[in-house]
Amino acid sequence: MSGVPIIILREGTEEIQEKEARKQNISAMVAISETVRSTLGPKGMSKMLVDSLGDVTITNDGAEILKNLDIENISANMMVNVAKSMDEEIGDGTTSVVIFSAALLNNALDLIEQGIHPKPIIHGYKLAMDKSLEIIKNIAETISKDDDKVLINVAKTAMNAKGISTLKDFFASLALEAVKHISNDDGKTFNKVSNVKIVKAPGKSLKDTELINGVYIQKEKVNSMMPEVIKDAKIAVIRRKLDVKKTEFDAQVKISSPSEIQRFLDQEEKILLDYMKIFKDLGVNVVINSSDISDKFGAYLARDGIAAIKNVGESDYKSILKAVDAKLVDDLTSLTEDDLGFASKVEFEKIGDDEYTLLTGCKNPKSVSILLKGGLDKILSTAEVSLNDVLSVIAKVMDTKTVVAGGGAIYIELAKQVRLYANQIGGKEQLAVSAFALALEEIPKTLIQNAGFEEIEKLTELRAAHKTDTDKWIGIDTITNTIEDNYNKGIVEPAELVNHIIKSGSELANLILRIDRIINSKGSKSPGM
Ligand SMILES: Nc1ncnc2c1ncn2[C@@H]1O[C@H](COP(=O)(O)OP(=O)(O)OP(=O)(O)O)[C@@H](O)[C@H]1O
Ligand SMILES: [Mg+2]
């Protein structure tokens, strides 16, 4: 057999080759980048998203916008997925990763049009990516986990570009305090950010937002006769249906006389009373159940002054377990004192239109809540998205303890050093490494454009300012329109954020550059936009 592969295509299959395939993919991705580009940075604009039901969201968060786009092109979708992974792994930087990867692809397309084959471009991009990561490692500032000043600055920088920036001092301290509650020294604070529960409370204004040392659960008590407030709560967190199984009844009961009905009702009563006895013997006064509680059992609990919530979702009961230091129990007969949790107060309250259970004064509060207040639903949703970014970046820095200066500083410095590196490389790869440096500058360039400043002039000024190692953090502050040392100025972000932008942006670009064919089966969606 010869070494030439035979490709059998289904009837009606359309095949788009080489240049055309690449062009189609890249232009779809550049179009996505154009959609989010104007939102980057403190002077970025917001987008109004209208869904098919006419619901409106106003946001300048890249992840939010991309989530709502209806994209058919597969490569463009890959870009959206990279942004999503950015959101999951860092919690910020989604707009930047899209801008950077689109710039890499655009610059690659220019080189291809000059007759350079994608292979040396892919190789050059890989070299430049590795170099960039190495540079970041060398120049990033190391801080201690409890350097509150830098952590506050990280929070404020992430907020600069968001709707809640006018209250950034307030929210930065609040977010830092919240993250400190959930963190310990295991370097995994980021994975625990969901233990800061954000509860939206319409009505007041954002600056009335409070950090609650406890957990809010959107659940009402099972029976209205249960107490509104329980002090010194002894809490059982269980996963056991508190009901009598109807099936046992159906299968076994043949009723032939009224006395037999009574006997079986008594039996049901006995099972319920046995459950009650377990709680009462242990002094339990709050029951949190991830399963159901029947109306009848709810009435029994209420009669004995025990409060309960039922059908509590997994993330909620996990938060409670952490906050009150309890153990989840499936088999009630094995419930012991040791399994119970403690909170100095459990209360039921209505916030807006919703009923909540609030547990405060917990033994070991590894889970806290931010009661986010605000006048309008839209303001609350925007603030929630921003606050999530802020909590994530604080946690990331606590875990990794390295930061770099924002406002374009890190990208200008990287571009400078990557250009010097390009000079050491020969061949066509050199052109690709230089193209990579240019793509790095796309982020400061966009920040400048969005602020309405003259782009060439400011970019030239920034490049010229990076003379020696001590200039590495010189960047632009588009709020004050000054070019200075942004690290000293407090415009800082996690080094890991920039690492991730560079790594996943480059990997995506290289993946797309490797595609030389689009094979479209009959009936599949068009590769174009
Ligand atoms: N005062 C400032 N002047 C200039 N740039 C700033 C300032 N504060 C923050 N930035 C920059 O703004 C950029 C972040 O903007 P933005 O938050 O809109 O985008 P993102 O983080 O890439 O995406 P998203 O937050 O939507 O996921 C970072 O490069 C950051 O350094
Ligand atoms: Mg951001």
Image (cartoon, rainbow, N blue to C red):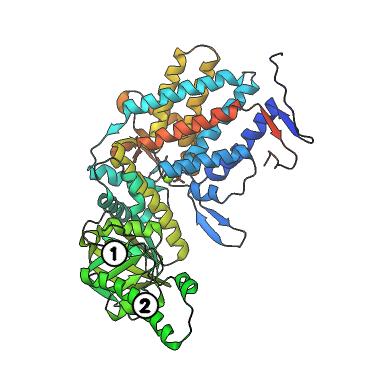
Residue type at numbered disc 1: Thr
Looking at this view, is 95 or 521 the one in front?
521
Q: Is residue 142 left or right of residue 373?
A: left
Q: Which residue is label 2 attached to?
A: 267
Question: Cα distance, mark 1 to mark 2?
Answer: 18 Å
367 up-or-down from 7: above or below: below
Does label 2 point to a residue whose CB lies under 8 Å from ligand 1?
no
Q: Residue at x 44, y 61 (%)?
A: 379
Looking at this view, is 221 or 372 the one in front?
221
For the view shown, which residue lies furthest in the front direction?
256
Q: Is residue 73 left or right of residue 375?
A: right
Q: Is residue 101 left or right of residue 117?
A: left
Residue 462, position as x, y percentages in the image: 41, 31
Q: Within 10 Å of the Cα at label 2, are there few (<14), some (14-19), or many (20+) other Cα atoms?
A: few
Q: Residue at x 39, y 55 (%)?
A: 164
Task: Give the quarter of the image for residue 112.
Answer: top right
Q: Assign the N terminus to one quadrant of the image.
A: top right
Q: Quadrant of ligand 2?
A: top left
Residue 285: tell me if it is visible: no
Residue 83: tell me if it is visible: yes
Q: Which residue is label 1 attached to?
A: 333
Residue 39, position as x, y percentages in the image: 50, 46
For the view shown, which residue lies furthest in the bottom direction?
258
